[in-house]
Image (cartoon, helix red, strand yellow):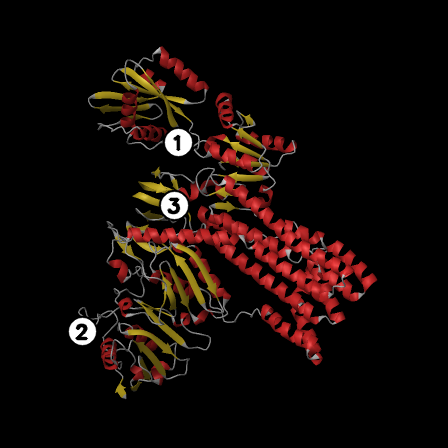
Amino acid sequence: MAVQSPMTDSVAPAAAAEVSIRLPHPGVLRLHNRQLFGDQASPDLQRFLRRIFRAGELRGLTLPATGGDWVDLHYDAGRHAAREVLGRLADCLQEASEEHAPAEPVAGRQSPVQPVVSPLVTARDRHGVVRYHRHRHLVTGWQVVTRGTGTIRLKNPVLYRKSGLCDAIERELMSVLGVDRYKTHSLRCTVQVDYDPRRLDWTSIIEIVDGALASAEQQEALDKLDLDLAICSVSLPVAAAAQFAFPPLMPVAAALFAYTAIPSFQGAWEVLFKERRLGVDVLDSLVVVGCLATLQILPGAVMCWCLSFGRLLVKRTEDNSRKMLLNAFGKQPRFVWLVRDGVEIEVSLDKVGQGDIVAVHTGDMVPVDGHIVEGMAMIDQHALTGESTPAERGVGDRVYASTVLVAGKILVSVEQAGSETASAKISQILNDTAGYKLTSQHKGERLADMAVIPTLAVSGLAFSTLGPFAGVAVLNSDLGTGIRMAAPLAMLSSLALCAQKGILVKDGRALELMNEIDTVLFDKTGTLTRERPEVGDIVTANGHQPETVLLYAAAAERKFHHPIALAILHRAEELGLELPATDETQYQVGYGIRVGVNGRVIRVGSRRYMEMEGIAIPPAVDRKLEAVHNDGDTMVMVAIDDELGGALELRAALRPEVREIIAGLRQRGIRHLAIISGDHEAPTRKLAEELGMDRYFAQVLPADKADYVEKLQQEGRKVCFVGDGINDSIALKKANVSISLRGATSIATDTAHIVFLEQGLGKLCELRDIALRLDRNIQRSWGMILAPNIACVAGVFTLGFGVGASVLTNNVAAIGALVNGVWPMREVARLEAERRHLLEMEIKASAGGAPFPEATAVPAMPDRADRAAPPSAAESRPAPAVPPDVAARPAPRKLPVRGRPRTTRGKAAG
């Protein structure tokens, strides 16, 4: 049928011709009008798209390449009749303007929805066809393939053979808070994202990838297809047919074989003329020449296939390992609240510059590095500094990106944003680690290179005594082809395992060296001991009880959060003391506190404070004070009214895991353990004896710590230095392996090889285990390659083995070694599965136990429930929509929190 265009006045004056409408299939309306649909760049077409998608019945749209005269509109034929959809479209198209949609819905029809329609370039395939899919208020080129709890798989033909677009999407996903893992595939045109549904909604994922695609530089040329493995696979049956069934095919088989060997010749050229050494690629090239010369095409084709498969496996493992490493850090909010003229404006993070003021509210992640200019807050810095409890920060204090504001509100003056933040620099460190080139300095390469000359020598002997076939067979039985791929795979897998366990390895060689360590030197303060002290003995005076002294001290310190106050409050909590109310607190900086408790005047502070207040110190307390001072600890005096009630001993709190770690290191072959400290002799000696250390160094200045590291090395020891990473940079650099327990303030600038991302030393034994397993893995791969190849060489001299037997044994052994190299990834996958299981349990618990739907295949267009979304202007950033099945449950905690009350608030235009 044909109808007059309803857009004559409001949308397309030039398109006043009739619009022909057909129904080619159930659920499809085809509209014909060359003037309107013939030019994809037409502004009339853009307005048409925004208008029609106000109709909630539409699920998608297909627009042919420029020059066509039709458009297909998709709807659910099972729920809506064609006449109903046409009526709804007419209502939407006849509106005077996009900004004046009717406030009330038409009777029996859905309310108009303001759609966010993505640019045509993000939905156009390589043939010029545009395919739009609707996801609530979003109209994009992304099709939802599958969706489950915390995972979604999307498809967009725009990605076909365009790795640059995939890279742009990955760069965006890498920095998004709530995205755990991601994977793109340019040939399949897919993006798979695992995310935390408490932080992100699935429509937010679509919005993120669509925004990244829209802002990416469009790639016109298609990627060159990597057909290496495919051609190698074709070469195998051709070579078999030529070798055994149809000899005339031999020239074709030889040409295919020679073509598949090009990477080996390129590698040999690099090794011989650029690196100026003999490498495994030289042997491979000689084998290819030998196979061609002896017409042993099938064995050579098998060798090339195995080499191609190994290269592909290494590349994929490297890519996956890099993504796992990068996901450990670099997460930042995409939008921030920028304060301008007293108004908070939400802008993208890349619009923020040095000197700007940003507002951070409760639940938000701090988006920048800077200092506080207004407000006070509790900030969780665990991810960067390892601090187990949130830290109080006020005006003048520094804050860092990727930390979470637990309570309060602050205004932050920006010092670094985006790629300049400490968190982003950590991400760069990880990128450098993942890209660590495994050259001849790597153990696997060294082992492979060591085998070249012996292999050439034995091959020459076989050639001179048994002929060319024997010489090629021995040459092909090289011992390095598998190990040079298996060793990098083992290294990359181990790096991914470290990242999964919260260990940041900044230099891959540190894992190799960690296996050789025989001496561990611990910095005392902040490493073996906590920053927060603990309450030891409680000395009483003038007839007061220890519990009374502790009670009054805790009541006075209740409003403070410095380490001494926290230690006293923690001890009172352990004893179950109920703290009384206090009146106004008077605090004298550097001395003490004066407070009223139950009608009594309580003073808590140093000995100097007591003397200033005229409080006498009894001789028994004075003697205890001197003894404690000699041990390197401190005493806090507590006065009740006008007499001393007692004193609390505050001593360094040993980390609870230290003894277990020391014992674990002894069991793992560490023969020498030592402490180095700037503290006094007595407390350092006492701690060393308590922990069973072999040696200690006391009263050492930070600048001199490197001298003691060098002293141990001169004794023939391989030293691992474990410090806090702040003032130990010289010692960290001097040690064979250096480990830092600190976080963002030093991680981007110190020279530690390894950083523990969690508080304490708990990862030290795990790191040693990973290093030991890495060494055993490489040795096992070496054994898996060595045994069959030596047996084959022996068979050449004794049993007449030929090229075919050598190819079989060599490549089967190489594939076995490759599988062994990626074996650590099994543990990575297990840990990731456990993490996701815990995440799902937490989500269910926060949602009142209601089960989430299992992952299912999703039709090309979303269902009806997905269309009932609130309006959202195309120019503004839409808030993440809430799925219907979640909206009915108690809302889980979300970070960042949006929609909070603000005194003044604006929205960035455009």
Q: Is residue 40 above or below residue 849?
A: below
Q: Residue at x 23, y 70 (%)?
A: 112
User: Mark 2 = which residue?
Assistant: 106
The mark found on residue 532 in the picture is: 1
Pick the quarter of the image with the C terminus. bottom left
From the image, state whether disc 1 or disc 2 is nearer to you.
1
The residue type indicated by label 2 comes to: Val
Element type where label 2 sits in the image? loop
Element type where label 3 sits in the image? loop
The mark found on residue 742 in the picture is: none
Q: Residue at x 60, y 61 (%)?
A: 310
> At which x and y percent is residue 551?
27, 25
In-image side of 808 versus 677 (left or right): right
Q: CA distance from mark 1 to mark 2?
A: 66 Å
In which quarter of the view is residue 857 placed? bottom left
> At which x and y percent is residue 585?
25, 27
Element type where label 1 sits in the image? loop
Q: CA distance from mark 1 to mark 3?
A: 21 Å
Q: Residues within 10 Å of mark 1 (few under 14, many from 20)?
A: some
- Identify the mark nearer the N-term, 2 or 3: 2
The answer to whether one can see residue 705 in this image is: yes
The residue type indicated by label 3 comes to: Thr
Q: Is residue 455 above or below residue 626?
A: below
In-image side of 544 versus 839 (left or right): left
The residue type indicated by label 1 comes to: Arg
Q: Residues within 10 Å of mark 3 (few under 14, many from 20)?
A: many
User: Mark 3 = which residue?
Assistant: 403
